[in-house]
């Protein structure tokens, strides 16, 4: 199994935070277990070059999937994802506000949505998966996706907003500011910032920061499974252990220990890998 991240080229660095690549071939009888994905502070475009996936939303019980290219905005609930045995995924993780800049679609229309990307982007998107499968290396695959994105941006893109820059800084510093601080860094009043943030990110800034903080804790536990929860809570910007427990239950429906027990049974663990993205 291959789980890798790739930095975008300089030309795409204003729009893309990272590229994720997942590749495996499961040769044993039967199917792989489902993967429970908690909410993450991100908008993504996914290319399924081989087998597709099916998705079930934990709270709404909505079922979808079997698409070759998928666009999704901010997710606010756990999704259970079932994948095929011959799997190659390249996922574009956009910087905050970048998806809005490329598509012009208010991001609150994309929240908890799993959309056929062919209905949003140009017809050239239909050729990308074929190009990925023709590549001789993972780097060539990433380059094929980058070429498509650069053409899309050249055809239509909107100006960057100070809000996007301020929010993107979260991923480089890891510091959890208040909404007021983010608004100040965006040169906006808190009220205007909250309105514009919802348009560009699909959720309130308060909720986004909660997801960002939770995501840091989730990743830290997977990287350091023996680390106690109080240490994780204090390192990730929670007030205390109970604050962390409350956010875990709010975002996943489970206590921290219970949700990580579920994560331990994911398909990545079958291959001896750990989700640290």
Image: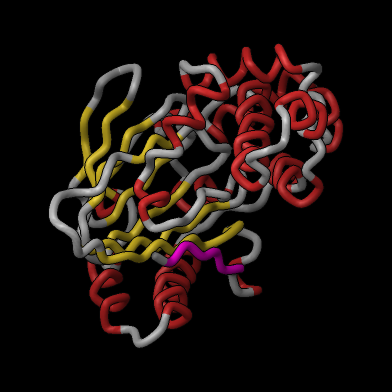
Q: Percent from the top left, x then y, of residue 27?
A: 20, 64
Which residue lies at the image location 41% right of the left edge and 84% below the top edge? 137
Question: For this view, does 56 lie left or right of residue 30?
Answer: right
Q: Nearer the viewer, residue 218 or 173?
A: 218
Kindly report the secondary structure that dominates the magenta region of the rendered protein.
Answer: strand
Residue 92: % across, % down:
47, 58
Whether residue 88 is visible: yes
The verdict on residue 265 being magenta is no
Q: Compared with residue 17, is residue 210 higher up or lower down, i.e. above or below?
A: above
Horizontal side, residue 180 vs residue 5: left or right? right
For the question of whether residue 182 can be seen, the reply is: no
Rendered position, 195 above or below 48: above
Q: Quadrant of the N terminus?
A: bottom left
- In front of the other: 225 or 235: 225
Is 3 a magenta residue?
Answer: yes
- Which region is colored magenta? 2-7
**Residue at 48% across, 26% down:** 259
What's the residue at 56%, 35% (across, down)?
Answer: 201
Q: Residue extending furthest bottom?
A: 136
**Which residue lies most toward the front here?**
226
Using the rendered view, name the quadrant where residue 63 is placed.
Answer: top left
Task: Report the front residue among 264 and 10.
Answer: 264
Residue shown at 49% from the left, 44% from the top: 43
Q: Using the image as rendered, state which of residue 215 and residue 47 is in the foreground.
A: 215
Give the number of callouts.
0
Residue reaching furthest to the left: 29
Specify how the rendered protein is coloured.
secondary structure
Tell me where residue 23 appears, x and y as whole percent: 36, 65
Q: Is residue 26 left or right of residue 75?
A: left
Residue 58 percent location from the top left of the image:
34, 22
């Amino acid at each position: 199994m291959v789980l890798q991240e790739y930095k975008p080229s300089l030309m795409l660095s204003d729009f893309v935070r990272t590229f994720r690549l997942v590749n495996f071939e499961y040769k044993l009888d039967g199917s792989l277990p489902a993967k429970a994905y908690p909410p993450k502070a991100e908008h993504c475009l996914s290319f399924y070059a081989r087998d597709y996936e099916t998705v079930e939303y934990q709270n709404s019980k909505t079922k979808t999937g079997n698409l070759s290219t998928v666009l999704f905005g901010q997710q606010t609930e756990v999704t259970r994802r079932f994948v095929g045995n011959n799997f190659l995924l390249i996922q574009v993780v956009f910087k905050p506000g970048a998806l809005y800049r490329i598509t012009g679609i208010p991001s609150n229309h994309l929240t908890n949505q799993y959309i056929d990307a062919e209905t949003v982007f140009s017809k050239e998107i239909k050729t990308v998966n074929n190009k990925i499968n023709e590549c001789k290396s993972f780097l060539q695959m990433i380059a094929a996706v980058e070429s498509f994105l650069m053409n899309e941006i050249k055809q239509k893109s909107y100006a960057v907003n100070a809000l996007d820059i301020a929010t993107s800084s979260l991923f480089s510093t890891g510091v959890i500011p208040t909404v007021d601080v983010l608004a100040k860094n965006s040169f906006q009043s808190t009220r205007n910032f909250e309105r514009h943030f919802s348009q560009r990110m699909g959720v309130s800034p308060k909720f986004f920061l909660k997801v960002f903080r939770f995501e840091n804790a989730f990743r830290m536990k997977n990287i350091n499974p023996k680390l106690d929860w109080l240490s994780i809570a204090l390192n990730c910007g929670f007030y205390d252990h109970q604050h962390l427990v409350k956010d875990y239950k709010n975002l996943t429906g489970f206590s921290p220990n219970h949700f990580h027990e579920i994560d331990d049974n994911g398909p990545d663990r079958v291959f001896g890998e750990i989700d640290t993205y």
